[in-house]
Amino acid sequence: MSDFYQNGIITTLHNLTKRPVEVVEKELLEFSEKRPMGLVLPSLYSELQTKALPNIVEELAKVPYLSQITIGLDRATEDEYRHALQFFSKLPQKHRILWNDGPRLKAIDAKLKALGLAPNQMGKGRNVWYCFGYTLACNEVESIALHDCDILTYKRDLLARLIYPVANPKFNYEFCKGFYSRIANDTLNGRVSRLLVTPLVRSLKQQVDNSDYLDYLDSYRYALAGEFSFRIDVLNDLRIPSDWGLEIGVLAEMWRNYSTNRLCQVDIADIYDHKHQDLSAENEDGGLSKMSIDIAKALFRKLAIQGTVFNEGKFRTIKATYYRLALDFIEAYKNDAIINGLDLDIHKEEQAVELFAENIIKAGEKFLEDPMETPFIPSWNRVVNAVPDIFEQIKEAVELDYEEFSTQTISKSA
């Protein structure tokens, strides 16, 4: 049971009464008459073989208020795209799959790259960006939600609560971030959020005087949650990071573009579990190690834009402050686990903090080496200005892929 406390400078919407999902969905169905709703699902083909995604599809098949589902499919051959068409055909809502590795979408990507307007690396950010482009091209929804495809504990009330704040015509929110408890297998998860983001933000607050931006970030209960919802107009000006700084980068964009009274966060699940990344202590280009470096760089870049001057000495001070705060957090989480009858491996917690502390220095070094690095993908407004018919091109490519492969694929499965 969540409390009603409002922390920080954005609105927190709690789950105080555990309303039945059917009641919430009835309201959303009424809202959909004024604000049609859509969903974006960024997926790797490999996720079709997991336990999570089949259950997500089964749950989504029961959702009555969605007008459109857009699935971004990465790392798929032609046969795998065919299989994905069959896999998602269970969805009764209108849905389309962006075959990102198919020749049509790759050709569009090549055109944009030639203009310096395409994502410069593969990954979730690129997938989401093209899904947003297709959604804008269709112009069929007013509110849109996004969540990952690896949620093992998925129930459709997660989506209902996530999209409700931007779907209710009586609310004025442009953006909503989901939050939840990261508890699975009788232990606390979410190490990067618990042991890196929160103590790093608070250590930066000690080094940067009166930073409204850091106060804003510190207001989010789960800054790294992969669940968002938006009003559709937000997508035109949104610059999406292409690296692991995606979630932090989106929050920075919302801070840049909107007043905080147009932003909120909502409790969407009592328990949430998904695919866990390895710590990758020996490989800074993978797992939580790379994630921590990208997140730290994203924070440093944003603060530099706001006038903070960084140097090697500053980064060493930030590391020292972070390390002390993070160890204090471990103590707090240990006690929280004990009172709730949960396990917490203190050795692994301290190993993570030690790695993150070292990676703060590495992130600082990378920032100083290339302070002008711009991992953000251009906004769709900029792309449209350069290529006025880009939306028509994307929509046509997706529809032609669907028409070419879907009829024979789905009929064979039947």
Image (cartoon, helix red, strand yellow):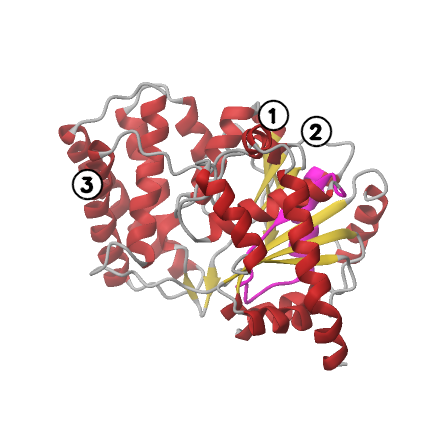
> Gap between marks 2 and 1, in whole Å?
8 Å
Q: The residue under label 2 is which amino acid type?
A: Asn
* Residue 314 image offset from top left, x and y in percent: 18, 28
Judged from the image, the secondary structure of the residue bearing numbered disc 1 is helix
Look at the numbered disc 2 and give the secondary structure of its residue.
Answer: loop
Q: Pick out the residue farthest to the left.
A: 313
Question: Image quarter for residue 172?
Answer: top right
In the rendered structure, which disc, 2 or 3, sits on the residue that comes first in sequence?
2
Residue position for label 2: 172
Q: Answer whether residue 317 is visible to the viewer in this image.
A: yes
Amino acid type at circle 3 is Ile
Of residues 376 and 171, which is closer to you in this image? 376
Q: Position of residue 199 (x, y in %)?
A: 32, 40
Viewer-side label of 2, 3: 3
User: Which structural element holds mark 3?
Assistant: helix
Magenta span of residues: 140-166
Image coordinates of residue 138 in percent, x first then y, are 72, 44
Q: Which residue is mark 3?
A: 361
Residue labelled with disc 1: 261
The answer to which of 96 and 285 lies nearer the viewer is: 96
Residue type at mark 1 is Asn
Q: Nearer the viewer, residue 297 or 223?
A: 297
